[in-house]
Amino acid sequence: MRIGIIGAGRMAAVLAQRWVAAGHEVMIGARDAERGKVLAARLGPDVPSGTLREAAVFGEVALLAIWPTDVIPALLAAGAADGTLAGRTLIDCNNPVETMSFTLTTGEVSLAEQVARLAPGSRVVKAFNQCHADVWAMDPPVFDDRPLVVPLAGDDPAGKDLVAGLVRDTGCEPLDVGPLHRARHLEAMAAVVIGLLYGGAPTHTVFNLVDA
Ligand SMILES: NC(=O)c1ccc[n+]([C@@H]2O[C@H](COP(=O)([O-])OP(=O)(O)OC[C@H]3O[C@@H](n4cnc5c(N)ncnc54)[C@H](OP(=O)(O)O)[C@@H]3O)[C@@H](O)[C@H]2O)c1
């Protein structure tokens, strides 16, 4: 599968690395061309890099992994309003969490829903936002012999199926928690984890779904 990565930071790097290892074709899109080139070269000799817009149109899936306060400007810079993401599955892993009070910066409407409104025709799926990037660097993320369960929310069943496959490619188990409006709960859950991490918990701290 072709996956365009919008962003060239830590989350972009770890998830791209896992997906390249799983055999997917990945392109890095960055506002800073040099940073994009460096990350792409680290991922493999054939991994291309380009602009945010080029990454948006690269594949059937795009990952949006941008510093939280700049997600919307970056989405617009990627051409979302012009339809660059139409017909594509757009993964939103971003956490709109203010790191003094650990409150959400978005109010009633989740960031994922805002992204969906600004990227007409795209199939937005909230996923990969629940734990630190160090967890995605684990191969595989397993805790007490149990794979990490990764909740995802979205309105389009085909989009969610596709993201569920990408979750399995990281060695985790997908868990469909419902439509995109549930993203506000996933973002709030992440705020709890971020509060723990800022309080000194190890970066491999996760909430996992287990049963007896
Ligand atoms: N890190 C984690 O543990 C973690 C875990 C779960 C979810 N997340 C979420 O994932 C997202 C990315 O986090 P990260 O840790 O990967 O951040 P990061 O390492 O700081 O990378 C952020 C990326 O956003 C880009 N960016 C910032 N403002 C931009 C703008 N206006 N236009 C275009 N690109 C812009 C940066 O570009 P430059 O390099 O040019 O500055 C950089 O490539 C965040 O929303 C975060 O909440 C992070």
Image (tube, helix red, strand yellow):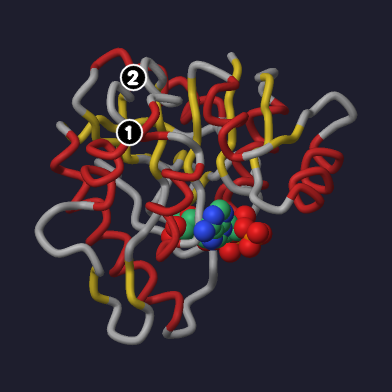
The local crowd at label 1, few if under 14, some if 14 to 19, many if 20 or more residues have their Cα within 10 Å, is many
Q: Quadrant of residue 40?
A: top right
User: Mark 1 highlights which residue?
Assistant: 119
Rendered residue at 85%/32% (across/down): 44
Q: Nearer the viewer, residue 64 or 204?
A: 64
Nearer the observer, 87 or 127? 87
Can you see residue 152?
A: yes
Quadrant of picture, ligand 1: bottom right
Point out the residue furthest to the front here: 82
- SS at badge 2: helix
Report, in whole angstroms, how far the alpha carbon at label 1 lies from the one at label 2: 14 Å
Query: Could you tell me which residue is drawn at 30 percent across and 67 percent down?
Result: 191
| Residue drawn at the location 59% of the way across and 39% of the way down | 52
- Image height of 159 relative to 203, above or below: above
Q: Place residue 76 in its image quadrant.
A: top left
Left or right: 156 as drawn, with respect to 96: left
Image spot of residue 3 (x, y percent): 58, 25
Q: In front here: 1 or 78? A: 78
Q: Amino acid at mark 2?
A: Gly
Between disc 1 and disc 2, whose residue precedes? Answer: 1
Q: Report whether the residue tagged 2 is closer than 8 Å to ligand 1.
A: no
Query: SS class of the residue under badge 1?
Result: loop
Which of discs 1 and 2 lies nearer the camera? The answer is 1
The residue singled out by tag 2 in the image is 159
Quarter holding the N terminus is top right
